[in-house]
Amino acid sequence: MEALRPCLVEVVRETGASAGLLYLVSLDGRVLRLAATSGVPPKIAALWERLRVAASGPVADAVRERRLVWLASQAELTRRYPKAALVLPYDVALAAAPLVAGPMVRGALVLLWPGSRPPRLGAQERRAVGAARDRMSALLERAAEDGQPVLPGRAPRHVAPARGPTAGPAEAQAAADFANRLPEGCCALDPEGRITFVNAAAAELLGRRVADLAGVLLWEALPWLDDPAFEDRYRAAVLSHRPTSFTALCPPDLRLDLRLCPDGSGVSLRITPVGIAATADTVDRPGSEHQGTGGLYDLMHLAATLTEAASVRDVVELAADHIMPAFDAQGFVLSLAEGGRLRVVGHRGYRPEVIEFLDLPPFKDATAPTVRALTTGAPLFFASPREMARLNPAIPRLTGRGSWAFLPLIASGRPVGCCVVSYQRPHTFAPGERAVLTSLAGLIAQAVDRARLYDAKHQLAHSLQTGLLPATLPTVPGLRVAARYLPGARDMDIGGDFYDVIRCGGAGVAAAIGDVQGHNVNAAALMGQVRTAVHATAGAPPAEVLARTNRLLTDLDSGLFTSCVYAHLDLAGRTVRLATAGHPPPLLRRPDGRTEILDLPPGLLLGIDPGAEYEATEIPLPPGAVLALYTDGLIEAPGVDLGDATAVLAGHLAREDPRDLDAMADALLQRSPSCGDDVALLLLHPPPPP
């Protein structure tokens, strides 16, 4: 490790980079850990301390693909790596080179430059990066060959960059005298964030002695600066080499304006009370950019939240819920590309007539900012109605808004749609805010892409389920029927529960309900086969119907098992014959309201043993009675005994009025414990004579 650090310092100096990071691969090869930094303190680089090799990001890609990754700007970073841009929302360029030692990649060299640099690596810069990569790789390979591979330590080490000419004693004293004569506070920090000089005015404002501050890390000397917002401002200054400012509360009640002026040797910090800074200084405060800093942490939470979004509607709701408060926005619109147009799929803060105007612009409409953003792949920011009017004067007139951000949604290089964030008043989009919004668009694009796939699967599942269950039940004189099916809250909302009612001629009616093991397309397909088999043999004795269906399922050898209850109703004889294959027991509500759980002879689940036999039971079915067949999703709940749950369902059935059979079915579903499984319910009611 000691030999690697001078290489890091040298390549930072030769390339003019603002910071250099050295990553080493962990022993298991799964993680890149930050081992050394130059130009940026390890505390400030803590957000990037640990990177997964399998993750999407410039450093991980350089390691996996064994190539140099070059990103010329923050915009390019946000387009290609939106998740990485969330934790690096600064105006920087980046190069990541793998450190290959023999057959293995042992680490990565990362260099960061201010975003104002030329968009391409110059020949001298490429040579310097290549030479440093080769030297570091050779050192790592030699260490591995000696049986002492270099592994990352517990914490990264900072390597001080080479310093320029040192001032003489007289010159240093003159500089100190000059700083002490100033009425404002002055403080100098080295690249590690350590205080190397502080004048008397700064010490007085901070309520500390000069001797107590010199040589101490800034955030250790002043604990009230040890917060993510200040770290973000400091990180932005160090990496971009651009001045930035920040307002902080010095306990107990003094608000200070901190002005950070960085270069490669460290940071000069100017400290003034806020009131004085406001009149004596014209420097732009963070303002909306600082708001974007707070928004950064909200958006990092959104990044995690969006992974849970299943449908496009979920994405719209989650994105709007997070973005509008994080950026104090008043409007949000999400449009998706469909058939050469942009269709609005969700919005907040707009009247219907506005959405109607904004909806479905064709891709050839050059005046639609959503189309222009998507087709060019570049975000558009309009800070005032006047700016927007140059492109489309109808938008500010109709919407009444004062500023807009149009963010293209690009997923895997494909145009997905456009996200619009709008404000009631004119709003200047600071560079940091633009970077975070652009990063957000990348996250939304990926979430929408996943959600559209889910929605397509959901629609397929719904169509398949609808096609396999009976579209309508037959009308049988002397029998009223109510049926319900609810998909479980999991996977693609598809399962193996089924029901059927079949006319058997004369006064005979067959009814069946069952549950195929599993919640996937295979279960649904087998459910269709079971229902077909029951339908084909209906009219035979119940025990025989189950036996034939069982032999079919064992011949199919699907590996899935099915429970089923089959009932044959003789409406003329007022009886019902039932047989079960491992299914929850039916309930019989008698005309006087007394309800019993039918104890049927047990039968083996269908699809296990081709020789299984089943036994039927005949019971009276008087007019006014209700026979309830159901699947276990109606009664199952974690920690509840099935026998007790069945008794509870019987009690609910007893209390309902069978004169409105549909209301009875709905009430039973509403009282279900809803454990997330599919639910099928079939109520059969021969009404009493008028």
Image (tube, rainbow, N blue to C red):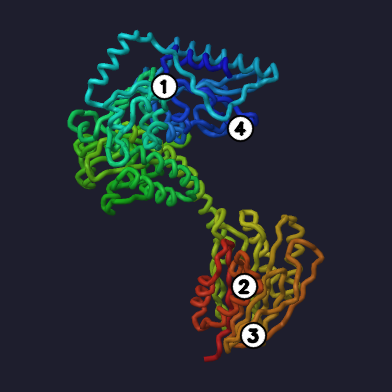
Alpha carbons under labels 3 and 2: distance apart? 24 Å
Residue identifier under label 3? 621
Question: In this view, which residue lies farthest toward the left?
Answer: 279
First in sequence: mark 4 vs mark 2: 4
Callout 2: 10 Å neighbours few (<14), some, many (20+)?
some
Residue identifier under label 2? 645
Q: In the rendered structure, which amino acid carries the disc numbered 4?
A: Arg
Q: In the rendered structure, which amino acid carries the disc numbered 2?
A: Ala
Which quarter of the image is occupied by the N terminus?
top right
Alpha carbons under labels 3 and 4: distance apart? 67 Å
First in sequence: mark 1 vs mark 4: 4
Q: In the rendered structure, which amino acid carries the disc numbered 3?
A: Leu
Q: In the rendered structure, which amino acid carries the disc numbered 1?
A: Pro
User: In the image, what residue occupies the spot 40% across and 51% down?
Assistant: 317
Task: Please name whichever residue, 275 or 686, is drawn nearer the observer in this view of the structure.
Answer: 275
Q: Nearer the viewer, mark 1 or mark 4?
A: 1
Please tell me the numbered disc located at residue 235. Answer: none
